[in-house]
Each structure stands twice: as C-alpha cells, then as structure tokens.
C-alpha cells in the first residue's frame, strides 16, 4: 500500500452514514458474524462501503461497534454501530486469506466543509434544526458543517451519498438548499393540517 492508504475489513451495505450517525445492523451471514466477533474481541473498526444498484461505490463509512443488542442460538445478531469518519475506497477484495469476509484499501479524506452561506444559515435557524448535539436548535452560530445540516434533515442513505460524493462546496450547498426548502414545505403543510385538525 502507498503512504496514506489503509486496509479495513468491509461489510458492504445499502447504507451510507455520516460521522456521529448510529444505526442497528442485522448480522446473519457467517462471514459478517465472524467480522463482528473479531471487532468485538480486539476493538477494531470496520468499513461499510455504500452499495448502490448492487455495485460497491467509491465512498463508505468507517464504523465502531458500540454493542451487541441481541443474539440468538445461531449466532445471528443485532448490533449497534456508530460512524467515526468516511473514506474513499480504492480497492476491494471479496475475501481475505483465512477469513470469510472481505476488505478494502482506503484513504481518509478531508471533510471540513463549513458553510457561511447566508441563505443556508437563515433557513437552518428558521426551521429550528437540531444541529448542535448539546444545544440542539438553540444556536447562534454563523457557520455550520454541511454534514451536520444533512444529519439534522434525517436524509436517506441515497441522498447522503449524493451529497457526500459531490465533493464541491457550492454544489453541496445547492443540494442542501433544495433539501431544506423541501423540508420547509413539508413543515408548512404539517402546520396547516394541525390547524385544520384543531379547528375540527
């Protein structure tokens, strides 16, 4: 491997996570049961390369195992994982020697996408999005991380991946602006329905 490249065990899924995202995973294939057991034993992280249209894409999520939530007699389990950072997948091997699971050669990328775009900032504050993990929507920030905005919108994996793969500040801001306007429209419709319900 070249300098800056790393090897990471892989669990390909139709799931794309951003740093801080936590999700439960169902694990039932023997190769991934082996992977989870080894990660639990030595505390190492693994990668979830995003699968789209049955193809492994070039970006994925590095995750840490938080806990094994449930396990049955067949060793099938439900686990809770948390994304620590994202990566660029350079090469993928379906199976490692002496292992059932595969791995990938990756490089970590700079994801410091801070925005001071006034249109975005105003919308985020108007919609009272819970950006800050401690303060929630009570924030006076004049800049936000684009991925924090994306997480607060609870985007689907497909949309998170579209945003992440743009890798261009202005295009990412434009993408999020459209998502925020859509969220605003939904919220307004919900408010109208709530008022109509109250009148009845």
Image: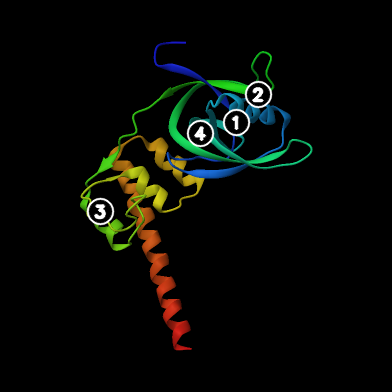
Disc nearest the viewer among 2 and 3: 2
The answer to whether the residues at label 1 and label 2 have Cβ atoms under 8 Å apart is: yes
Q: Which label belongs to residue 59? A: none
97 or 183, which lies in front? Answer: 97
Label 4 and label 3: CA atoms lie apart by 29 Å
Q: Position of residue 199 (x, y in %)?
A: 44, 88
Sequence order check: which comes first, mark 4 or mark 3? 4
Give coordinates of residue 31: x percent, y percent: 69, 27
Which residue is at the front of the view, 159 or 28?
Answer: 28
Q: In the picture, residue 14 is in which quadrant?
A: top right
In the rendered image, residue 67, in percent from the top left (x then y), is placed at: 58, 39
- Identify the residue shown where x is 59% and y is 38%: 53
> What kind of element bears circle 2?
loop
- Say which of 200 and 62 sits in front: 62
Q: In this view, does 178 lie to the left or right of 43?
A: left
How many residues crowd mark 2 within 10 Å: few (<14), some (14–19), many (20+)?
many
Which dot marks residue 11?
Answer: 1
x and y percentages locating residue 69 in the rendered image: 63, 44
Q: Name the residue under label 3.
A: 121
Q: Mark 2 points at which residue?
A: 101
In this view, 91 is above or below 138: above
Looking at marks 1 and 2 on the same chain, the residue that comes earlier in the sequence is marked by: 1
Say which of marks 4 and 2 sits in front.
Answer: 4
Image color mode: rainbow
Determine the secondary structure under disc 4. strand
Q: Which of 6 and 91 is in front in this view?
A: 6
Q: Distance between the residues labelled 2 and 3?
A: 43 Å
Q: Which of marks 3 and 1 is nearer the N terminus?
A: 1
Query: In which image quadrant can residue 187 be found?
Result: bottom left
Residue 63 circle label: 4
């Amino acid at each position: 491997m070249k300098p800056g490249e790393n090897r990471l065990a892989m669990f390909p899924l139709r799931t794309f996570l951003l740093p801080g995202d936590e999700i439960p995973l169902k694990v039932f294939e023997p190769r991934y049961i082996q992977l989870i057991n080894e990660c639990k034993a030595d505390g190492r992280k693994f990668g979830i390369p995003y699968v789209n249209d049955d193809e492994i894409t070039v970006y994925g999520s590095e995750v840490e195992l938080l806990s094994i939530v449930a396990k049955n007699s067949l060793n099938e389990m439900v686990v809770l994982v948390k994304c620590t950072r994202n990566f660029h997948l350079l090469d993928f091997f379906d199976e490692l020697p002496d292992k059932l699971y595969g791995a990938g050669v990756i490089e970590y990328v700079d994801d410091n996408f801070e925005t001071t775009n006034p249109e975005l900032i105003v919308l985020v504050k108007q919609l009272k999005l819970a950006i800050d993990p401690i303060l929630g929507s009570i924030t006076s920030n004049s800049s936000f991380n684009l991925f924090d905005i994306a997480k607060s919108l609870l985007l689907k994996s497909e949309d998170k991946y579209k945003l992440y793969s743009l890798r261009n500040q202005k295009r990412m801001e434009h993408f999020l602006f459209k998502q925020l306007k859509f969220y605003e429209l939904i919220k307004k419709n919900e408010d109208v329905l709530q008022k109509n319900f109250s009148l009845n």
